[in-house]
Image (tube, rainbow, N blue to C red):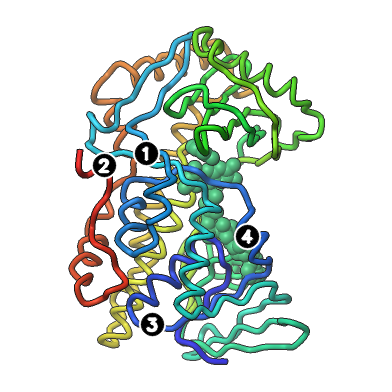
Amino acid sequence: MRTQVGIVGAGPAGLMLSHLLHLAGIDSIVIETRSRQYCEARVRAGLIEQWVINLLNATGVGARMRKEALFHDGIKLSFNDELHHIDFRKLVRRGVAIYGQQEIVKDLNARRLADGGPLLFEAEAVTIEDIEGTQPKIHFRHRGASQMIACDFVAGCDGFHGISRPSIGKVLTGFDREYPFGWLGILANAKPVDDELIYAYHERGFALFSVRSDHVVRYYLQCAPDEDAGKWSDDRIWSELGARLPEKARKRLKTGKITEKGVTAMRSFVCEPMQHGRLFLAGDSAHIVPPTGAKGMNLAFADVCVLSQALTQYYKSKRETLLKSYSATCLRRIWQGQRFSWWMTQMLHRFSSANDFDMRRQLAELDYVANSEAASKALAENYSGLPMDRFLTELRKAAPKRPAIRPWRIRHSLK
Ligand code: FAD
Ligand code: DHB
């Protein structure tokens, strides 16, 4: 097999890259170790930034999101037994949407397959070779046969545990931090406790109250990084969630059948540079953030927007300036995402090493964020997503020539 861009991994980064390249007339093949069913059922991120809402719309994969997503104008911070509203719309004239990562993956899979793919699921023993030459290769086994794809470029979109980053490990520098806690996440059939997400600071530990629909909630509890989810009965989970809410909100907490439970450890990680030879890393394969700032998938989409633009420049004009600056361009945004995710995490979690001074400092910081316009604006600006205007403007300019791109309309821009 031969293609222009070989993409390893069919998560949000790999699928969106393949879709953007298709819109630009560039061929790609996506290779994924898991089955399509598994990828479409994997429950992870939920929150997308304003510019990602716009991206899905602008590239013709936003139809179901427009109908099914929940559009929010802000979040609530909970501390000292009270809820405090941070109004993004008023502060920065942007919003966010709750639309499950697996729904985006379903929409992108359907679109890529309708456009001819190819997406190769259930590949085994994937390796990348010859990235320092002009024709890198991806080797793997598929349906019992050995396969090889010769490419111009390889995009490593295979997540934190993939093979792309280790295959160039010797030339990379990693920067990381582990946190002494994890999140126990549940999905449950219950009515949401609030019409916005609640980020709750509590002496018993952090809790996040998110949602998937009018009757499905996604809640998280701070726990030990190696916590055994099996030790948490449904009753214990509901009672702990209630205990970490202010009294008024606790009364509105509805319980229901818990359909999924899992523990995620927390870490911050960045590798630099994000490219070696003709292998470009994108998304979680190059960086991980603690989920408190809801940045992981949003950063993955930002990387592949930059990469698709660089590859488009290369194929149109054989110029490599954007490919050469890929890593530096992405890292600037990634470090902003890292800084914000770390800041939200340290402000909202209980650290076992913290003393009374540290806790009073956290409460003072929350008080400042909730009550100073300057501070709440900084949170709103980062949470709803730093601008990606240049990329989107260029996509819009290109739209009339490409019928696959839908008109530029989002529900909230009409407000
Ligand atoms: P992945 O989603 O990890 O996809 C990588 C793909 O590569 C997978 O399909 C994997 O099976 C495949 N793969 C692995 N190895 C190989 C191989 N050797 N060969 C081929 N394929 C391979 N982000 C947000 O933006 N907003 C949120 O609200 C948010 N909440 C989160 C909550 C939790 C609890 C967690 C855990 C994460 C959250 N995130 C959030 C982060 C988000 O889920 C990730 O950042 C996102 O999945 C990254 O996408 P990706 O495509 O880079 O990697
Ligand atoms: C969700 C996850 C997050 O980490 C976050 O900060 C916001 C929402 C979610 O899964 O809904």
Callout 1 crowding tier (Cα within 10 Å): few <14, some 14–19, many ≥20 = many
**Image quarter hosting the N terminus:** bottom right
Pick the quarter of the image with the C terminus. top left
Q: Residue 412: give its label.
A: 2
Query: Three-letter amino acid code at disc 4?
Result: Cys
According to the picture, the residue beneath numbered tag 3 turns out to be 26
Which residue matches tag 1? Answer: 71
- Residue under the point 70% across and 32% down: 258
> What amino acid is at disc 2?
His
Distance in Å between CA atoms under marks 3 and 1: 33 Å
> Residue 209: x and y, percent?
53, 28
Disc 4 residue: CB within 8 Å of ligand 1: yes
Q: Residues within 10 Å of mark 4 (few under 14, many from 20)?
A: many
Front: mark 4 or 1 = 1
Residue that label 4 marks? 39
Q: Is mark 2 within 8 Å of ligand 2?
A: no
Q: Could you say which quadrant of the image residue 77 lies in?
A: top left
Report the image quarter containing ligand 1: bottom right
One can see residue 162 in this view:
no
The residue nearer to you, when weighing 160 against 105, is 105
